[in-house]
Amino acid sequence: MPLRILLAVAGLLLVLLANAASAAAPQHWLYFPSRGGEGETLRATKALSDPRFVGAQIAYPWRLLEPKAGEYDFSAIRADLAYLRSQHKQLWVQLQDKSFTPQPNVPAYLLSPAYQGGALKQSMASAPERDPTQPLGSDEYGWVPKMWEPNVRGRYQALIKALGQEFDGQIAGINFSESAIDIGTEHRDGTTTWPAGFAPAQYVAAIEENMGVLAAAFPQSTAMVYLNFLPGEWLPWDDHGYMRRLFQRAAELKMGVGGPDLMPYRKAHMQQSYAFLRAYPAELIKALAVQDGNLRQKNPKTGKRNTVADNLQFAEQYLGLDYIFWGLEEPYFSREVLPKLPAAK
């Protein structure tokens, strides 16, 4: 083969490899579980000026967005969107219906008999952000909205549609809070007693229905569902097809999929959502967040605490993520994330 042809082929291969490497590098975002009362947390975060971060993923509680039934207040989103645009950054909305504190995130009007109480208390015992060596405190609980109740779900879907009417195409994306809930009483024989009126299959069906509403309301922005764990199913031993069904439906709707915890090779996650996330179509969006507690966990492959390098390698080479939402937990963010994150391309 003539030398000029060999050089041309070699050059083409280098271009293809460079493009592949570029495509494999995820976008980096900052994650805010709270914006602060008037957005002061967002505005005080100096890392927003860092060119490595595309924008901010901000969690907005349902109760903030709908203080009264059918009366919406999107002023916080509007203010944050305007501020981020002034900084040449993008906004990603996390619609926070679940809570991990004693304060429910559903509107107060839902906590009534008309809506079957609106929410259920959930345990925080398995949350990665808490120290498992410490006893569970009396205030370590949160709340789960009763999405399996049609009238509660109807109010949530009305909110989604109202958000879509104003913000579709204006924000980069929107996601639900995670699918995992910690309710029910587990027994030694492996069975679970669920709260009255609850069944895992109904909960999964509610998520699936909400996914369709979100995808329809946000055809221009990225509509994303967070799938990590589901009640009544523990793969691979107790497989009811719940996780498989929701990932399949997300692909049919061309939605993004993601989750709250990027923890490389963590056994529970590998057997549940990570396997489906890895196999999800490459042309669709995949994302994970590095939230509180994630960088305190051990990497089973190294036996050492997770590092930024571990997260990047796992995100890019194993899962093929498009986005990583980095939490601001200290001292990890200042000491590890900022010094180790690669330069923007």
Image: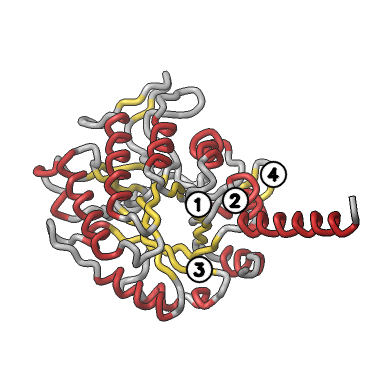
- Say whether disc 3 or disc 1 marks the residue closer to the N-terminus: 3
Tag 3 near tag 1, CB within 8 Å: no
- Residue 130 visible within the image: no
Query: How much space separates mark 2 and mark 3, taking CA atoms?
Result: 17 Å
Which amino acid type is shown beneath numbered disc 2? Ala
Tell which tag, 3 or 4, sits nearer the viewer: 3
Query: How much space separates mark 3 and mark 1, taking CA atoms?
Result: 15 Å
Q: Secondary structure at mark 1?
A: strand
Q: Residue at x 35, y 25 (%)?
A: 192
Which amino acid type is shown beneath numbered disc 3? Val
Measured from the top left, where is residue 132 in percent x and y? 51, 45
Q: Residue at x 49, y 74 (%)?
A: 48
Measured from the top left, where is residue 56 in percent x and y? 44, 67
Measured from the top left, where is residue 70 in percent x and y? 13, 58
Q: Which residue is mark 3?
A: 54
Q: Secondary structure at mark 2?
A: helix
Tell which tag, 3 or 1, sits nearer the viewer: 3
Q: Residue at x 51, y 42 (%)?
A: 281
Q: Looking at the picture, tell me which residue is in the foreground, 276 or 142.
A: 276
- The label shown at residue 322 is none
Q: Secondary structure at mark 3?
A: strand
Q: Which residue is mark 4?
A: 303
Q: Residue at x 36, y 61 (%)?
A: 93
Q: Which residue is mark 1?
A: 288
- Say whether disc 4 or disc 1 marks the residue closer to the N-terminus: 1
Query: How much space separates mark 4 and mark 1, taking CA atoms?
Result: 22 Å
Which amino acid type is shown beneath numbered disc 4? Gly
Query: How much space separates mark 1 and mark 2, taking CA atoms?
Result: 8 Å
